[in-house]
Image (spheres, rainbow, N blue to C red):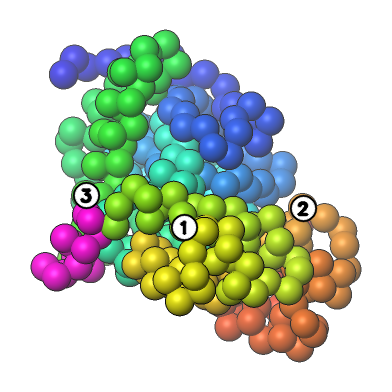
Amino acid sequence: MSDIQASPAAPIDIETYIDSGDFYAERHVPEPMGQAHWHDHVELNLLLAGGMTYLFNGTRISIGANRVHLFWAAVPHQVIAVEPTADLICVYLPFADFLALPVADAFKSGVMDGRFATMAAPDPIDPLLFQRWAAEWPEGSALRQQILREEVGLRVKRLSLDAVAPDAPADATPCEVETAEEAPRLANAGRRAIARVQAMTDHINAHFGEPVTVEAVAAAGGLHPTNAMAVFKRVLGMTIAQYIRRQRLSRAMMMLVDTDLSIAEIAFGCGYGSLSQFYEEFQRHCRSTPRQYRLKFRR
């Protein structure tokens, strides 16, 4: 593999130029953001040099060079500080592609629950690999782009075995969450099952602000409710009800950051039956009140 070099460009506007179903890889000089944003990709990042700080889910996370980081970008995030030498490569993996990866339930559900995953230690191959992806993706043929997507998928699978929290000490031991029994089950989830689950999650994402029944979700996937619950759990590692709760919460978090709607309007607009239910769910997962969470992004 050659030592690929290219001049980093300005950051792209991911929300404007890339559809949620599109894969993309690019290199740029990161800049502090005026406000938090979100998009429905799983983001895989590598700093080639320098450092930067995110406000991620209301928490400051500082990252340095040469360690791969992954997070679900549907969680509100904002770059708030950047070192002058920072040089960043971002890979935007469509959420459906992430769902299709045969990674362990604990890793997948952790990412969807708003955890920021970081490589336990730098891997010398990563800078070359990420530079190649960023250089080849925009101009690559369809076949080359497909190979690139498969390479990214394999990199995420390896990360799922080697990830630690971003603030873990340098000698932290990664937690291999995939068991011997789980690996073949994940590998055999099947394209049809994944397609059905994607149809079910699409239905939930479109109707999370309304009462959502298992029967309606199952119908979207063309399955009997009992079969739908089993397939959903097998592919995503969580129940339909858990996914609905997480989607409602993530959308509420986005609306707290992006809008000036009242907390009551957000709660009921996201499908919560009462304000007390919303506050209880929010404080359990975010360890702050909705108002406190909103203020973190508006300082």
CA distance separating discs 2 and 3? 34 Å
Q: Amino acid at mark 1?
A: Val
The residue at 14%/70% (across/down) is: 181
Q: Quadrant of residue 55?
A: bottom right
Q: Please give the residue where the numbered disc 1 appears in the rendered image.
A: 197
Q: Nearer the viewer, residue 256 or 48?
A: 256
Q: Horizontal placement of 277 versus 40: left or right?
A: right
Q: Please give the residue where the numbered disc 2 appears in the rendered image.
A: 258
Q: Is residue 209 above or below residue 120?
A: below
CA distance separating discs 3 and 1? 24 Å
Q: Is residue 182 above or below residue 189?
A: below
Q: Amino acid at mark 2?
A: Asp
Judge depth for marks 2 and 3 and give the one in front. 3
Residue 208 position within the rendered picture, expressed as x and y whole percent measured from the top left? 69, 65
Q: Nearer the viewer, residue 232 or 175?
A: 232
The residue at 43%/28% (across/down) is: 25
Q: Is residue 283 above or below residue 110?
A: below
Q: How packed is label 2: few (under 14 Cα within 10 Å), some, or many (20 or more)?
A: some
User: Helix, strand, or loop for circle 2?
Assistant: helix
Q: Is residue 5 visible?
A: yes
The residue at 49%/64% (across/down) is: 223
Q: Nearer the viewer, residue 282 or 46?
A: 282
Residues shaded magenta: 176-188
Q: How packed is label 3: few (under 14 Cα within 10 Å), some, or many (20 or more)?
A: some
Residue 288 position within the rendered picture, expressed as x and y whole percent measured from the top left? 65, 78
Q: Is residue 50 visible?
A: no
User: Helix, strand, or loop for circle 3?
Assistant: helix
Q: Horizontal placement of 55 versus 124: left or right?
A: right
Q: Horizontal placement of 181 versus 276: left or right?
A: left
Q: Please give the residue where the numbered disc 3 appears in the rendered image.
A: 158
Q: Is residue 162 above or below residue 43?
A: below
Upstream in sequence: badge 2 or badge 3: 3
